[in-house]
Image: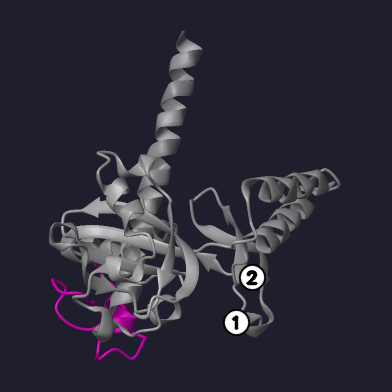
Amino acid sequence: TEGASHSARNMAGTERDLQEARNRQLQADVLIHETYTSPNSTGASFQGDPNSSSMSMGSGHAYVPTVREIEHYTRMLNNPGAAMPHGVFVLADEANGLAITGLSQNCAQFFGKEVPELMGKSLLEYIDNPSAIEAALMMKDLTLANPVSVGIVGEDGTMRLLANLILHRLPNGLAIDIEELDPYENAFSFHARVRQAIDRLHTCETSEAMCQRVSEEFFQLSGYDRVMMYKFHEDHHGEVVTEFCTENIKDDSFLGLHYPATDIPQ
């Protein structure tokens, strides 16, 4: 019993140490962010009132960021205001016939129109089978309806592409993530490709080789521009240990870069 109690205390101490290390890292990240986003910053020093978002690095006084600064920084990390390039984000008013109230800037790749032309229009005008969405919205739990497979059409009714819609109800409207659907892909063919990829993993003799193979296989399966393997260290910061990407972005490699623990939303 005494040994178990001692082990429990050690585990609690270790967890506490890790949390304290994460808090210190978060504070350091906030200071770095404030320095490089300050309009008067040179990127080399913090200046100004210690109760604001700056400090003097040469003064010998350690400045701890305010709660407001930390909340602002973590909110920015968790909600960067950007959409993944392979999809389009739409915010619609469910009570007003799915009138579009918000769009990601890349909407033209799916709809053939820019943001100003689509704002206020009903999303249903650009769907070949509006009843599929209407049926999904009748379900209390939208997760049971996702994904909703539909065709995206132009104003003249011509088919532009097939897409999967992922629906989420938010306080300010219906959030819709739209991703293009490959008409030649089906559950059976995809399962076969995954099965073959798993079989190839059995040839890996080291963990490094396994990481490389997993990244490469997922890159081939997903069609993403970039796939990386992220390793977490004991202090919770991360390192990019493998990377596969398309030719047009190979010069902008993330391989070998380290990122603070606070980059991962909690």
Whether residue 68 is situated above or below residue 186 in the rendered picture:
below
Which of 79/199 is in front? 199
Q: Name the residue under label 1.
A: 252
Residue corresponding to mark 2: 255
Which residue is nearer to you in this view: 168 or 256? 168
Residue situated in front as seen by the camera: 100 or 88? 100
Secondary structure of residue under mark 1: loop
* Residue 171, quarter of the rendered image: bottom left
Can residue 137 be seen in this snapshot? yes
Q: Disc 1 residue type?
A: Asp
**Could you tell me what secondary structure mostly forms the magenta stretch?**
loop
Q: Is residue 18 depicted above or below 51 in this figure?
A: above
Front-most of residues 109 and 149: 149
* Rendering coords of residue 154 (x, y %): 39, 78
Q: Magenta stretch?
A: 35-64
Q: How far apart are marks 1 and 2 (CA)?
A: 9 Å
How far from the left and from the top, in percent, is residue 133? Answer: 32, 54
Crowding at mark 2 (Cα within 10 Å: few <14, some 14-19, many 20+): some
Spot occupied by residue 183 in the image (x, y as percentages of width and height):
59, 61
Q: Quadrant of residue 35?
A: bottom left
Q: In this view, does 40 lie to the left or right of 226?
A: left
- Amino acid at dot 2: Leu
Is residue 52 rendered magenta in the image? yes
- Give how far across and how far down residue 54 sits, in percent: 22, 77
For image coordinates 22% across by 64% down, the residue present is: 92
Crowding at dot 1, Cα within 10 Å, few <14 / some 14-19 / many 20+, comes out as few
Q: Which of marks 1 and 2 is in front?
A: 1
User: What is the image's colouring?
Assistant: one colour
The residue positioned 44% from the left and 77% from the top of the image is 158
Hey, which residue is sitting farthest top in the picture?
1
